[in-house]
């Protein structure tokens, strides 16, 4: 039972790292495009980073033994 949880840890860790890295780069890209700060930009950053984190988590779960 404990092995099932241990097998998921790399996916959780890597998806968390991917979320913060993606949010940094999305914010930087939107700043370079001179898009003003606001709730819409924050939502775009959050949804984009969340989608990338889900993708990384999915790929790690598929690849990791």
Image: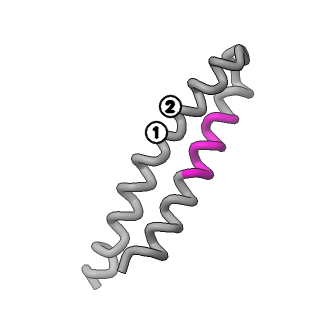
Residue designated by label 2: 24
* Residue in the foreground of this view, choosing between 39 and 23: 23
Quadrant for the C terminus in the image: bottom left
* Residue in the foreground of this view, choosing between 59 and 43: 59
On screen, 63 above or below 35?
Answer: below
Q: x, y (%) of residue 47?
A: 65, 43
| Residues at circles 1 and 2 in contact by the CB criterion of under 8 Å | yes
* Left or right of residue 19, residue 48 in this image: right
Q: Say which residue appears at 40% left-offset and 64% top-offset.
A: 11
- Per the rendered image, the range of residues in magenta is 44-52
Residue designated by label 1: 21
Binning the other alpha carbons within 10 Å of mark 2 as few (below 14), some (14 to 19) or many (20 upward) gives: few
Binning the other alpha carbons within 10 Å of mark 1 as few (below 14), some (14 to 19) or many (20 upward) gives: some
* Left or right of residue 47, residue 57 in this image: left
| Chief SS of the magenta region | helix
On screen, 53 above or below 58?
Answer: above
Q: Quadrant of the rendered structure where residue 13 is?
A: bottom left
Element marked by disc 1 = helix
Q: Residue 50 magenta-drawn? A: yes
Q: Say which residue appears at 57% left-offset and 51% top-offset.
A: 52
Q: Say which residue appears at 46% left-offset and 39% top-offset.
A: 21
Q: Residue 62 magenta-drawn? A: no
* Left or right of residue 61, residue 52 in this image: right
Q: Quadrant of the rendered structure where residue 54 is?
A: bottom right
């Amino acid at each position: 039972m404990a092995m099932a949880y241990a097998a998921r840890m790399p996916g959780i860790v890597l998806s968390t790292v991917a979320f913060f890295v993606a949010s940094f780069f999305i914010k930087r890209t939107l700043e370079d495009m001179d898009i003003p700060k606001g709730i819409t930009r924050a939502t775009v950053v959050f949804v984009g980073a969340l989608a990338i984190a889900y993708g990384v988590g999915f790929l790690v779960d598929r690849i990791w033994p």
